[in-house]
Image: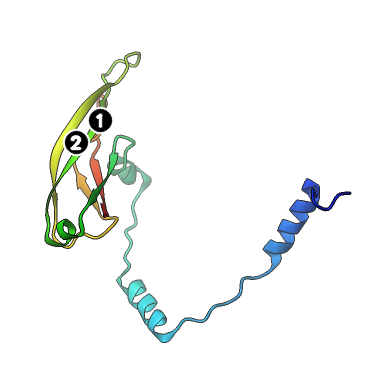
Amino acid sequence: MDESNPSPKRLRRKQKQKAAVPPKSATLSDDDHQALTDFCRLATFEETSFESWQNTHTDLDLHVPIWVSQDLAKNGGEALVRCSRSIKSGQSNTKPIRQPISLNVPIPPGTSDGSRLTLPGIGDQDAEKVGNLIVIVHLK
């Protein structure tokens, strides 16, 4: 058999052999260990039921990325967001309407890359609920 074109069975066997090798353990420096300890101390979690999570995280939320300058993120201000949202009527056989949205979003001072700003009630909408507009801030 040609070794340059191994059979799928042989490839699976090689992959299993590679997976069986334990990863090399890395030791942390004292600074990294302290940073990790500090992070774990600050991390919090909240237990929530699926029903309450579902009420706050719907498929109607509209996620929109924006890019702002370093100065705007550091000092705060406003950024123009343009997007469109989907509005569905109560009838199942009708197509959703696309509505353009253009609004100034306040950028708080000290905003970091990847921050999420939630504007309630501006996302997609169906006959019963309205989602949120979630603006994801990226730095230029």
Identify which amino acid the numbered label 1 is placed on. Answer: Arg
Residue 117 in percent (x, y) is at 21, 50
Q: Nearer the viewer, residue 20 or 112?
A: 112
Q: Considering the image in quadrants, where does the C terminus appear?
A: bottom left
Residue 98 in percent (x, y) is at 26, 24
The secondary structure type at the circle numbered 1 is strand
Q: CA distance from mark 1 to mark 2?
A: 8 Å
Which residue is under mark 1?
Answer: 85
Residue 132 in percent (x, y) is at 23, 39
Residue at image x 29%, y 55%? 114
Which residue is under mark 2?
Answer: 122
Residue at image x 27%, y 22%? 88
Residue at image x 37%, y 78%? 37
Identify which amino acid the numbered label 2 is placed on. Answer: Ile
Q: For label 1, count other residues whose C-alpha is less than 10 Å away and answer few (under 14), some (14-19) or many (20+).
A: many
The secondary structure type at the circle numbered 2 is loop
Residue at image x 34%, y 16%? 92
Q: For label 2, count other residues whose C-alpha is less than 10 Å away and answer few (under 14), some (14-19) or many (20+).
A: some
Residue 87 appears in view: yes
Looking at the rendered image, the disc whose residue lies closer to the viewer, 1 or 2, is: 1
Query: Marks 2 and 1: in contact by CB < 8 Å?
Result: yes
Residue 105, quarter of picture: top left
Q: Nearer the viewer, residue 71 or 48?
A: 71
In the drawing, does residue 20 fall left or right of residue 43? right
Residue 113 in percent (x, y) is at 27, 58
